Amino acid sequence: MSTIIRQLEETTAFLRSRYPHTPAAGIVLGSGLGNFTTQIQPELEIPYSEIPHFPVSTVEGHRGRLIFGTVAGKRVVAMAGRFHFYEGYSAEEVVYPIRVMKSLGVDQLLLSNAAGGVNPAFSVGDLMVITDHISFSVINPLLGRNEPLLGPRFPDMSEPYSKDLVNRLKSIAAEEGIKLQQGVYYGVTGPTFETRAEYLLIHRLGGDAVGMSTVQEVIAAIHMGMKVAAVSVITDLGIREEDNVITHEEVLQAAAEAEPRLTTLFTKLIQKM
Ligand code: HPA
């Protein structure tokens, strides 16, 4: 048996011994967006440090635990804090929790992230449902020997973000009076924010927003046949003319301000699952 399959079996056995139910959805919360967890009626919370083979989260704004519980009566498992490539984790470590979710029987994945806007029509605080992504600037988590028990060698990426879930998010936003942009998420490794020239290039290459997460997780999820939806909070704008200094604090503040709208979108989506 390959190492990854053995590790997944050990992690899954540990989690199942604590929590015997199958969640309907997995949720990954981005920087400054962890407050969604207050919507969860918790049944079990486990710090990452106690889960066999889990990496441990370090970045500011993350609390590093797996939460099992219910949202709107539906069972979910949520990561409060994700693993970023820029923290020094390998691409395989970044996606390990996603693989664990699938091993637990989770078929739908909801992700949030903070992102920089490069579409001139965007404002700070906007939500953007991700319709597609560009991953060429990040390390693909499927590099290396393929594990056929997880998925195919050459996964199709024509619909990384489920059209069905994107449409449902749009309908919910319309019903709730929440402004929802849509667009292409351009993945980068960070940890530097982009230079002016890089923001412009990303826009010219087809990106609407740029961020340091999500893409690797989505690739691993699609590899395993999961259905994915993701929403970015536009926390800063990369292509302003004026002096444009971007700080992590400003990103966290914009994320916190947008968080209640994101929470509404995710809660209603889960309710209808
Ligand atoms: N660039 C990359 N990642 C980000 C940004 C940004 O401007 N804002 C939040 N995450």
Image (spheres, rainbow, N blue to C red):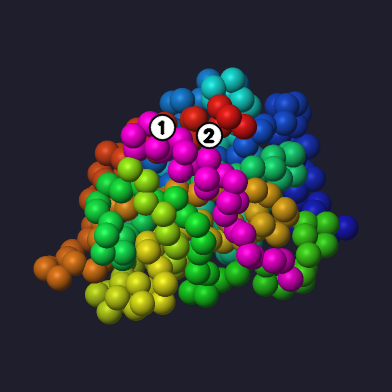
Is the residue 122 above or below the residue 112 in the image? below
Q: Quadrant of residue 257?
A: top left
| In the depicted structure, whether residue 98 falls above or below residue 237 | above
Helix, strand or loop status at disc 2: helix
Q: Which residue is mark 1?
A: 175
Quadrant housing the N terminus:
bottom right
Please name the residue shown 61% across and 25% down the image: 74
Residue under the point 78% across and 65% down: 152
Does the magenta-highlighted stretch encompass residue 174?
yes
Q: Residues within 10 Å of mark 1 (few under 14, many from 20)?
A: few
* Mark 2 closeness class: few <14, some 14–19, many ≥20 residues within 10 Å: some
> What is the span of residues highlighted in magenta in the rendered image?
154-178
Residue displayed at 29% across by 52% down: 235
Look at label 2 and name its amino acid: Leu
Mark 1 Cβ inside 8 Å of ligand 1: no
Where is residue 216 shown, x and y percent of the image?
57, 61
What kind of element bears circle 1? helix
Q: Gap between marks 2 and 1, in whole Å?
A: 12 Å
Q: Nearer the viewer, residue 267 or 253?
A: 267
Amino acid of disc 1 = Glu
Left or right of residue 132, residue 50 in this image: right
Q: Could you say where residue 66 lies in the image, as x and y percent from the top left?
A: 57, 36
Asked whether residue 239 appears in the rendered view, the answer is: yes
Left or right: 253, with 22 as reference point: left
- Residue 17 screen position, x and y as percent: 76, 29
Q: Is mark 2 within 8 Å of ligand 1?
A: no
Given the current orientation, which residue lies at the most extreme left position?
242
* Residue 269 marker: 2
Q: Position of residue 63 (x, y in %)?
A: 44, 39
